[in-house]
Image (tube, rainbow, N blue to C red):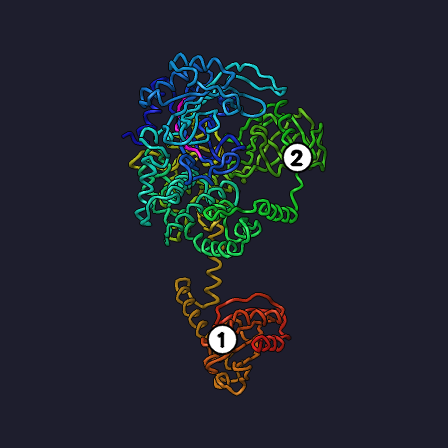
Amino acid sequence: MKTVGDIRAEFLGFFEKNGHEVVASSSLVPQNDPTLMFTNAGMNQFKDVFTGKEKRGYTRATTSQKCVRAGGKHNDLENVGYTARHQTFFEMLGNFSFGDYFKEEAIAFAWELCTKNFGLSPEKLLVTVHSSDEEAAGIWKKVTGFADEKIIRIPTSDNFWSMGDTGPCGPCTEIFYDHGEHIPGGPPGSPDEDGDRFIEIWNNVFMQFEQLADGTRIDLPAQSVDTGMGLERMSAILQNGHSNYDIDIFQTLIKHISDIVSEKESASHRVIADHLRASAFLIADGVLPSNEGRGYVLRRIMRRGMRHAHLLGASEPLMYKLVPTLRGLMGEAFPELNRADSLITETLKSEEERFKTTLDRGLKILDEEVSKLSDKTFPGDVAFKLYDTYGFPLDLTQDALKSQGLEVDVAAFNENMEAQKAAARAAWSGSGDTGTEKLWFDIADEIGATEFLGYETDKAEAEIRALVKDGDRVDTLQKGDKGLILTNQTPFYAEAGGQIGDKGIISKDDAVFKVIDTKKQVGQLWLHIGEVESGTFKIKDAVLMTADGRRRDAIRANHSATHLLHAALREKLGDHITQKGSLVAPDRLRFDVSHPKQITADELQVIEDRVNGEIRANTEVVTRLMDRDAAIEAGAMALFGEKYDDEVRVLTMGRDNSESGIPFSVELCGGTHVRRTGDIGLIKIVGESAVSAGVRRIEALTGEGALAYFAEQENIIKHLSQQLRASPAELESRLESLLAERKKADQEISNLRKKLATGSASSAQSTDDVKKIGDIAFKSLVVQDVPAKDLKPMADEMKRAIGSGVVTLIATSEGKVSIVVAVTDDLTSQINAVDLVRIGAEALGGKGGGGRPDMAQAGGSNPDAANDAVAQIEKNIAG
């Protein structure tokens, strides 16, 4: 039996033999289409090729594209696990022609692969064409010999594809497989077409026309082909199955799940297997769980899988245990799974551990609300509370209610969501920036791109091409005017890739423009932002551009240090480390990386030492211009989320690895850098912290900044030595001794406070002031200058003294008032300390309070109400 891997390889191999370039799957995060949440089709990475915006070195391509459909228009999440075909993650096999072959060759390729290579019986196949596409129908008849009833003409948009209201469009033809009469369903175009008998296995889109704004269509100058075959669907057929979950990849994962939970296959097994694949591949492509955007969709997928693990009785995190199995199944075809192994594993595990507590609480609330229902509709405001407070995505709540035949009031949920958003908008003052890109596109069309000279120099002559003031183009800028100067060329670096923009001076004769920042617009215009300090500047003026060289040198050092730091982090912590953000400023650097847990002090020291070793080696920093794909294939690091031109700058620094021969750091980068690593001087890591789940931030100083830091630390040590009367070497032991003395003194003070507050130890244990409220013994004390942390031990002492009853202790300290209520164990079934402390807290001007039925604590703001608080508690006990 052919495995999924065999089928993938056979598809790609077939088209490679027929002149197609085998192109690697693109990331699940689209790099050139902001309209997409995730890559959801094979053609996504070729969109600009189809529209003519991008040229590649081939006109035929084939891919196995990883796809996710779990948000927006293409959202399969709620059906996953319950149907034979729905998945959040899947592979789309495809072949593409960019103005090369068209319908005849595409249909012939599809038929040959299906019937000869894959061995599908023609009797089991039928095809659809758009009702207007007689050309495709004729080709199918010639290639297959099918009778007319097996070439079904579909008049609807199902068989006509368009990129939008305008642009490329064309008819589709689809191949369907007949699973047999034993499965309900009819052929495409029939009333029963939604059944599972006839399954679409391959869609061929013929990009034949261009749709104009007036609704007319004209022939495209270069007609193209975009096809898609679901790998899992084809694998199910070739492995003699019906459901996608029957294939070897899913069955291996499902068996592993069954081994862990000792349960036979169910919808929950299928949900977990699918959601594991989606989660692992998204994490490998740089998406981490969060509360917005792609990260939130990932969190929804993960939490849905975790809930189904809970349904199977898993008491411990489960999904992370499946990662080695998934890597064994798919790691060879997708090596990013191996590179990100530890990140995937740790992210899944930590998210499962974090969600388990809220899952238990949320499900309890859900069950309580269900028990109150008088109909089949679950309140939308409660669903929103589950989302907002307990992290339950709406679809998780819907999924949990599905088995009980209940539906969420989605309209009410959305009303609550919109109300929260409106409140957030009202609280946000905004930036006041109402500018539009139209201005920059117009300027770019007129003056062309700015030429950047800053790699070689920080000073150059240039000509002013455009001036902007208050968002409008102007002819002159005069003294005191704040605005933007655009020139034909510049040595100023524009903010990009984490490196901040240059500052400096633009001058001519007696005119000076102080540049306070440099930014880039529409990818090609350098905006020099600042103020005219003297004179006047006009269009076509010849000017001298001078970037602040000292500041630039400091930025260079910090930028080069981030490259060495990145390499050292990957070397020490693993290949899952990828850059998630950075700031390269003259006085510091900040570097955010994907890592599932805190980087320890020992690890940071090893990393710092490694970078300083490369700095001391003083190797040359080599810059080369290379073809993008060739550079990445040669080992250059491409940063996640960055879009690169076909020709890229490759920065190489550090000593060659003795085994691989590859330099320590090789990255694609458009920033400015030192000429030798020794120019950095040294690096000192001064901070490590969490940015979000799975992202750590490292802060560091280099060169003069690091030396200033060391000098400051030395001064602090000298001052401490003088204050503590100890040498620097003795400081640690001296401090430990002082802390021990302080701890002992604190304990003695605490004991004295208790004795003073209660009169004496014996009076605290006295029962003379105990009163009876019915059959309940009650004792209260109001004391001064006792910290809140000392109240519970005092309450325990009072509780022991009365044997059975309730004690209330109220204390003031530093203007604050605290209350503790304690109930002896024999009475907790009828009196709850939490209820009583909340009554007391309300009287004291506070609210809330918490603890256990036998001991609870709260705070207030009105110390003068202490006696009233005691009275209210007595009243409640009396009933």
**Amino acid under label 2?**
Gly
Given the image, on which type of amino acid does mark 1 rest? Val
Q: Quadrant of the C terminus?
A: bottom right
Q: Could you say which is closer to the camera, residue 12 or residue 758?
A: 12
Quadrant for the N terminus, please: top left
Secondary structure at badge 2 equals loop
Q: Which residue is mark 1?
A: 823
For marks 1 and 2 on the same chain, the one whose residue lies earlier in the sequence: 2
Say which residue label 2 marks: 435
| Whole-percent x, y for residue 847 in the image | 59, 66
Toward the bottom, the furthest residue is 768
In the rendered image of this protein, does residue 119 appear above or below residue 665? above
Asked if the magenta segment contains residue 865, the reply would be no
Q: Position of residue 234 (x, y in %)?
A: 36, 28
Which range is magenta? 61-67
Res. 878 visible in picture: yes
84 to the left or right of 851: left
Mark 1 or 2, which is nearer the eye? 1
The answer to whether residue 237 is left or right of residue 688 is left
Q: Is residue 63 magenta?
A: yes
Q: Secondary structure at mark 1?
A: strand
Q: Is residue 677 visible?
A: no
